[in-house]
Image: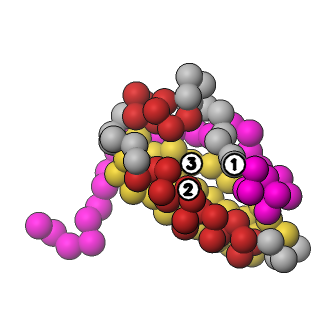
Amino acid sequence: MIARTWRGWAGKATADDYQRHYGSEVAVNLRKIDGFLGARLLRQDDGDEVLFTSIAYFTGMAEIRAFAGEDPGRAVLADVARRALTRWDERVTHHEVAVDLPVHDS
């Protein structure tokens, strides 16, 4: 399993707009990809801004390319996200998930 991690910052006035976009449009697009295993959007107050960290899980890099294109390290942002955010990481990171702890033992 591969975790794709990205960060973006929004002003307090537009942070909820970005969060709604992620929970709707981003969610719909990710769920269309074979090999998508889930995602989390983390939110943290960061002074006058709100820091968002997205962690999306995929079965492998081929599936990430289906989402991100030929350069899987490039951040993918829709125009609505660009309007809500003040700045963002242009590059994402990919990590192999070394340990995946379930909530309960099976």
Query: For residue 5, which numbered disc appears in the image?
Result: 3
- Front residue of 54 and 95: 54
**Cα–Cα gap, marks 2 and 3:** 14 Å
Q: Which residues are magenta?
A: 79-106
Q: Give the residue pinned by disc 2.
A: 26
Q: Amino acid at mark 2?
A: Val
Against 48, residue 54 (above or below) is above
- Residue at image position (20%, 73%) is 104
Q: Amino acid at mark 1?
A: Ala
Crowdedness near tag 3: few (<14), some (14–19) or many (≥20) residues, C-alpha within 10 Å: many
Pointer 1 with pointer 2, Cβ within 8 A: yes
Q: Give the residue pinned by disc 1.
A: 78
Q: Amino acid at mark 3?
A: Thr
Determine the secondary structure under disc 1: loop
Whether residue 89 appears in magenta in the rendering, the answer is yes
Whether residue 59 appears in magenta in the rendering, the answer is no
